[in-house]
Structures are given as structure tokens and as C-alpha cells.
Amino acid sequence: MLKRLLRKVPGLGRLIGGDRGPVSLVMLLREKPALGAPGILEAVRRALPLEAPSVQFVSSMPPPPWAGNLKTGADGYVLAVGRAHYFIVVSYTTYEGDPAATAAQMERADFAEAYAAHRAWLSVDFAGGETDDPYALIGRVAAELMPDSCLMLYLPHEGKGSFPTPVLLEAMRAGRWLEHFDRAASPIMTLADADDPELAAAAGEARRRWPEFVAAFRAGRGDAHSVKAPFVEGEQVEHMWIAVAEITDTHVTGTLGNDPQYILTLKEGQRVTVPVEQIEDWLYMRDREMVGGFSVKILMERE
């Protein structure tokens, strides 16, 4: 199982299994928010009166990498609470270059309508550090920041949404709000593998060097041999890792190393077989070093 690999490569687990990426709560807005550093500081102090956090305005912070196609028009703030850090991002453009394209993927018409209508956004994101529950703090801060122009709340890496109701705001202030979110669309990180040119190039390199992995596996060089491949169910596509047990000329068989979020007919640890031509990445451990992992290296560099 990939848990064996994850124990050997610190920080790798968040990128290739389990956690799907940054914890981010996005408020999609009807219009540009009138919110600057003083207003953000006041909202944070209301949300976290006991933690006495420090807030630092970072005027030159670029938009975070998980903000779709956004390139300009965002102000960033760093929030430090204990040993954890969070981003607060205020953007004056749409969350992605083409909101209609994401809206078209949404399973609920009301979510799709709200997403397509937004013209700006505000988010609270866990940036890293030590915390037991980043969702609790994110919810409390977002509840105080949320403007009246909020059309919809969106969890891009979970593909879930909700509307700003009094019940939801109360749950956010209490730190228990995830159960109020319903599935909306395929998560951004799941779709990124197919659409991201760097990841596409990484998949090409993995396929070109596939014989290296096969030779290492068959010769018993290294351990934790794993491959990544797409799994499809209807319109859902989920890119997941497999702990390899057998390789033939045409197929790879092993146990699923991820807990599927969208391919509900599969489960972690289940035996699966995929065609060799669908392999997107491969890796194994040798002398405590990762060999391969072409897409993993890109994601780690971005982090």
C-alpha cells in the first residue's frame, strides 16, 4: 500500500494520497468586495478573540496556484495562528478564466447558476503548519469576512458547494460546517492532471521511461513500487495511485492506494488492473530516495 511509501517520504502523502491539496474555502461574490486590510483585521479579531493572531499584509503575494486561471487582480494577507498559517485572498476577477466551463460540470442547477454569475471572490486557505483542524478556523474567519454579495461558498478541492444561509453561518462560527456542503462539481485537482501542461509533460516522461520501472520491479530493486492512472465512472475522472503487485506486457495489477472521492465503485485497498498505456506516473523507493514520481516532483515544487 502507498502508506508504506508515504511514511518514507515526508510530506508526500498530502500530494499523492489522502489529502487532496490545500484546504480552501472560497466565497464567490456578485461584485468586487470593499474589503481592505483594516476590515480583514477587524473580522479576524471578531472570529478569533482568544487566539490573538497576528495578521500581516502582503501586497506582493501572487495569487495562490490553486486559483484556476487567475493571474492578476488579487490582494493577499497572511494570518498566523499559533504554529499554523493561513492565506486570506481578495480577488477582483472571477475564480477561473471561464466560470461557465466549471458551471457546466456542476450537478445542481442552482450551484451552476450561482457559479456562473460570480464576478469576484474571497477565500480563506490553510497554508501549512501545525493544527488539529484547519476547517474549524477557516469557517470561523470566513463567517466574519463574508459580504452580503456572496452568492455561493465553494470547496474547490472537494468539488462541493453551499449557499450562505443563517444555519450555515452559525455552523461555521461553531467550527462544524462541512456537513452542510453538497457535491457540486469535479474537484479542481482531479481535473488538473489532464489540463495542466506540466503534468501532461510529466506523464509523457513517465511513459517514455516506463521500461526503467518495469526492469526495477522485476529485478526487485527498491520497494514501494507504485503507478498512477486515471479511473473513469460516467463523467467522473479520478487520478489515483496503485501499489504494484504484477506487471505484464499490457497491464498492471495491484491495490488501490487512494481513498476514492468520486469513483464510488472503488475503495482503498481494492485489487485493480489498468492498461499499461494509461499509466501517467510511476515511482519507487531506493536507498530512501524516490525514483520517478515525475508529477509528484512538480507538485512538491509548487508547494
Image: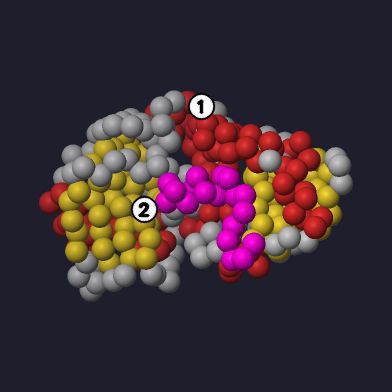
Q: Crowding at label 1, few (<14), some or many (≥20) Cα neighbours within 10 Å? A: few
Q: Residue furthest bottom?
A: 50
The amino acid on which the numbered mark 1 sits, given as a three-letter code, is Ala
Q: Is residue 236 above or below residue 271?
A: above
- Say which residue appears at 71% left-offset and 57% top-offset: 225
Residue 90: x and y, percent? Answer: 27, 42
The residue most toward the left is: 38
Q: Earlier in the sequence, mark 1 or mark 2?
A: 1
Q: Which residue is mark 1?
A: 101
Pick the residue in front: 116 or 218: 218
Image-based side of 253 in relation to 222, left or right: right
Is 290 included in the stretch rendered in magenta?
Answer: yes
Residue at left offset 58%, top offset 54%: 16
Q: Is residue 175 visible?
A: no
Task: Please state which of residues 302 and 148 is positioned toward the viewer in this rendering.
Answer: 302
Relative to 122, residue 18 above or below: below
Mark closer to the observer (1, 2): 2
Q: What residue do we see at 75% from left, 43% from top? A: 211
Q: Residues within 10 Å of mark 2 (few under 14, many from 20)?
A: many
Q: Quadrant of the N terminus?
A: bottom right
Kindly state the secondary structure of the residue where label 1 is placed. Answer: helix
- Position of residue 84 relative to residue 168, above or below, is below
Write down the region rendered in magenta: 286-303
Q: In the image, residue 196 lies at what x, y percent?
A: 52, 34
Residue bearing the label numbered 2: 125
State the CA–CA distance, disc 1 to disc 2: 23 Å
Say whether residue 287 is magenta.
Answer: yes
Quadrant of the image occupied by residue 34:
top left
